[in-house]
Image (cartoon, helix red, strand yellow):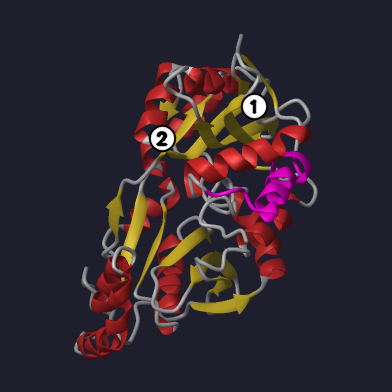
């Protein structure tokens, strides 16, 4: 008879092998670095909670055939301490013999002792399972935003993901972009590009910083959210350190945005790789300052030659994004489950700090590389 139980250290090689087959290479073996990483991520990282563990599904032959990854994030709602469980990789093998294994694993996870559960990478199939189990979709957190900076290079970056030789046209694309952007008037807003003179408002500047400098201001910007992370000791530094180890996405750049008075009004972190669309990990801003911070982010990326930017939405950024020629697409949904109506309502009202650092996109299992 099948069972669902907590992940044990001895299960890690089997779980890593399943992850390799399901998400990476169905015929390949899990490299030792992936095995070591999953052990650290799920059992040894700061914030791990012995009461809220990843779960494995063991079939009636005694073989592990399913898994749900879980990371615990301490949070605060109006001063009340909570435990949030982030649902990561949900995977099942041998579905033909047990088609409901995935639903049973998710149900067991949501029945855990955590105060709230969420995921920012739920597929359409996962959304159906969450909602059947009384979870909700958070639409304002469920969009990716896209800003085109250099149109020809942007198109080439998208095309080269499918057709590798397309990269050979990069010099031509850069020349076309340069001529096109120079013809734009200062401050002109177009969907197709950003003017060569930039978009940032005068009086605001983006100053490069490092992991330590960025981490030092994070709490200041998330405290206005009624529901926000209350990091375990060493947890934020671990998350940022992990996020930096994604060479295929590029270097993780940090910057602080300051007003003319020197007051830091925002910060951002994004991946930059020459010729590729930059992936934004996090945008932080004081209330009312999201617009200048976004402008500084776009100009920062433009100066480094990136063809565009892509990030995850938050309700506090949406108003500032309107009118800045930012497009929105739906790739995956942010979903939440809680038995506490106050938590559910706060999230419906956009009062929670989710996505990015308080989510999954920092994790190396998403777009990371393992030898």
- Residue 342 % position (x, y): 54, 23
Describe residue 91's horizontal placement relative to residue 244 as left or right: left
Find numbered disc 1 in the image and state the secondary structure of the residue it sits on: strand
Q: Residue at x 47, y 62 (%)?
A: 280
Write the start and end of the magenta stretch as one range.
Answer: 28-47
Considering only order in the chain, which callout, 1 or 2, is on the residue closer to the N terminus?
1
Please state which of residues 187 and 139 is positioned toward the viewer in this rendering. Answer: 139
Please state which of residues 108 and 322 is positioned toward the viewer in this rendering. Answer: 108
- Separation of disc 2 and disc 1 at Cα? 25 Å
Magenta segment, principal secondary structure? helix
Residue 39 part of the magenta-drawn span: yes
Of the numbered discs in the image, which one, if any, rests on residue 138?
Answer: 2
- Residue 72 % position (x, y): 68, 36
Find numbered disc 2 in the image and state the secondary structure of the residue it sits on: loop
- Residue 1 % position (x, y): 61, 8
- Residue 330 % position (x, y): 31, 46
Write down the residue under mark 1.
55
Tell me if residue 228 can be seen: no
Image quarter of the C terminus:
bottom right
């Amino acid at each position: 008879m099948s069972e669902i139980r907590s992940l044990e250290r001895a299960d890690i090689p089997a779980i890593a092998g399943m992850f390799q087959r399901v998400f990476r290479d169905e015929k390949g073996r899990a490299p030792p670095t992936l095995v070591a990483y999953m052990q650290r991520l799920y059992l040894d990282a700061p914030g791990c909670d012995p009461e809220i563990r990843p779960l494995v599904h063991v079939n009636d032959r005694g073989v592990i055939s399913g898994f749900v990854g879980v990371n615990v994030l301490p949070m605060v709602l109006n001063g009340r301490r909570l435990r949030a469980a982030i649902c990561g990789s949900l995977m099942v093998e041998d579905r033909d013999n047990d088609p409901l294994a995935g639903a049973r694993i998710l149900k067991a996870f949501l029945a855990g002792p955590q105060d709230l559960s969420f995921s920012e990478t739920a597929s359409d199939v996962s959304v159906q399972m969450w909602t059947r189990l009384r979870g909700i979709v958070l639409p304002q957190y469920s969009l990716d935003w896209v800003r085109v900076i250099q149109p020809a290079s942007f198109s080439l970056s998208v095309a080269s993901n499918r057709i590798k030789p397309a990269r050979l046209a990069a010099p031509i694309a850069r020349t076309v972009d340069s001529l096109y952007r120079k013809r734009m008037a200062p401050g002109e807003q177009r969907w197709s590009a950003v003017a060569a003179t930039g978009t940032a408002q005068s009086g605001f500047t983006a100053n490069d910083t490092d992991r330590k400098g960025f981490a030092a201001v994070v709490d200041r910007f998330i405290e206005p959210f009624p529901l926000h992370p209350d990091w375990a000791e060493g947890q934020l530094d671990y998350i940022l350190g992990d996020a930096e180890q994604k060479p295929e996405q590029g270097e993780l750049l940090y910057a602080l945005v300051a007003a003319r008075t020197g007051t830091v009004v925002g910060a951002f972190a994004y991946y930059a790789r020459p010729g590729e669309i930059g992936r934004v990990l996090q945008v932080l801003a004081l209330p009312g300052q999201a617009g200048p911070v976004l402008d500084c982010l776009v100009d920062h990326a433009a100066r480094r030659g990136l063809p565009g930017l892509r990030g995850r939405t938050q309700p506090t950024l949406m108003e500032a994004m309107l009118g800045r020629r930012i497009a929105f697409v739906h790739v995956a949904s942010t979903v939440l489950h809680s038995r506490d109506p106050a938590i559910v309502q706060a999230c419906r009202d956009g009062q929670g700090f989710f996505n990015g650092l308080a989510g999954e996109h920092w994790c190396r299992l998403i777009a990371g590389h393992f030898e």
